[in-house]
Image (spheres, grey):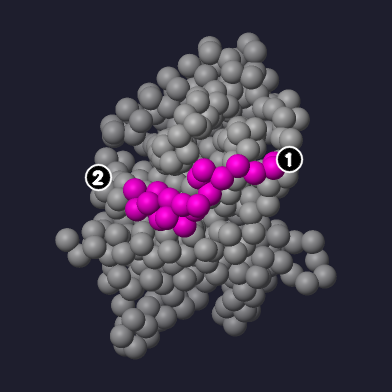
Amino acid sequence: MTETVSIFIATYFGVALGRIPGLMLDRTGIALLGAIAMIVAGTMSFAQAAQAVDLPTIVLLYALMVVSAQLRLGGFYTRVAFWITSVLVHPRFFLWVAMLTSAVLSSVLANDIVCLAFTPVLTLALLSGRRNPVPYLLGLAMASNIGSAATIIGNPQNMLIGQVGQLAFDRFFFWCAPPAAVALLLSYFLLCWFFRKDFQRREETPDARPILQTLPRFDRWQSTKGLVAVGLLLAMFLTAIPREMSAIAAGGVLLCSRRLKSREMLQLVDWHLITLFCALFVLVHGIETTGLPAVLLMKLKDAGVDLHDLFTLSGVSVVLSNLVSNVPAAMLLIRFLDPSRLDQWYALAVSSTFAGNLITIGSIANLIVIEQAAACGVNISFRDHARVGIPVTIVSLIVLAAWVAV
């Protein structure tokens, strides 16, 4: 038991730190190393480790990545991003259209992919128009996080929560979408306030045109195939058919293409994230075998910290999500939830997703936007993000608290 607890604590500490001094390990590598240690230490066998992985969640995540890859290679994201730039002459309206589009697409597709595809085009358009790209790119990242909170398939942690909690797609949406919509609108107003002096200012900007050569060209047929697949999936998610079965069937059909190579599509699958999920399933199962989570829950309750209280759960979720990232945080906290209290699962999904806007490392979407912008010569610092991210997160959580209290 002592070895298991030590491995778990050391691994989660490493995930929180993001690295191990002297080694070239990132969060996924650290989580994988911890899972390996659990098996080698005898906490569980290989068979038990395999059983610990929630295969339906992994299959759903994988299949939706294939669908997103279809749309990306078909140039759909690029075409939509170029359409948004048509209203660039009206900066505030452009910001709203960019944020709304990012939020809506992120609610039905992976928010990371949306940011990856949109950032270069929007940055190029803004630089060509001699405008400061920072407020618009921050809006893109924050809207993608907020919008993804609305549905089960909006982001990886929501997929995990929805699958493990066996939550209905429509009920999840009707509970989570209202606070996400209000938070999106308030976030837009906050961005307008913080960058009110930048909207009419013209700047000397670097040339980002070379980045266009790396973007997929729009293919009407391939994009239509992807959109039809998304529409059918959303319809099937409202039926009794298991979500993972619907998603993997759609992914399999899309792989049967005469133009898009399956290798190219599968290269866009985030194997890094899937490995992280599998490793975390093993780690959490390992700590569960010790009985420590149940003991910890009782001690917290005796100390007045009740994780079944929605306000307390949301607060712990926000703190933990910014320490170890929201996927590991959700993986850990779902073990403390009451299966009969669906509102606990909804609150965890929304709070852990809203938490991603607090600081740059809180969400992969933030890092993608920052890295893609840097490739175009635009620097978004930790301070730039925190200046807006902290108030946006606070306001979003106030909206969630008000929704919970209703």
Type of amino acid under label 2: Phe
Question: Which of label 1 and label 2 is nearer to you?
Answer: 1
Residue drawn at x 49%, y 31% as measured from the top left: 89
Q: Who comes first in sequence, dot 1 or dot 2? A: 2
x then y, percent, for residue 313: 35, 69
Q: Is mark 2 on a helix, strand or loop?
A: helix
| Residue at the (27%, 40%) spot, across then down | 170
Q: Is residue 139 left or right of residue 172?
A: right
Label 1 sits on residue = 206
Local packing at callout 1 (Cα closer than 10 Å; few below 14, some 14-19, many 20+) is: few
**Magenta span has 197?**
yes
Question: Would you place residue 29 above or below residue 114 in this image?
Answer: below
Q: What stretch is highlighted in magenta?
A: 185-205
Depth order, front residue of 59/137: 137
Which quarter of the rendered picture does the C terminus lie within?
bottom left
Query: Which residue is drawn at the image coordinates 49% and 69% (left, top)?
Result: 320
Rate crowding at label 2 as few (under 14), some (14 to 19) or many (20 or more) other CA atoms within 10 Å. Answer: few
Name the image quarter holding residue 227: top left
* Picture mark count: 2
Q: What residue type is labelled 1?
A: Pro
Mark number, residue 174: 2
Image coordinates for residue 253, horizontal then vertical, percent: 51, 20
Q: Can residue 285 be seen in this view?
A: no
Q: Which residue lies furthest to the bottom in this view?
A: 303
> Is 69 covered by the magenta stretch?
no
For residue 131, above or below residue 256: below
Could you say where residue 211 lies in the image, as x and y percent from the top left? 72, 32
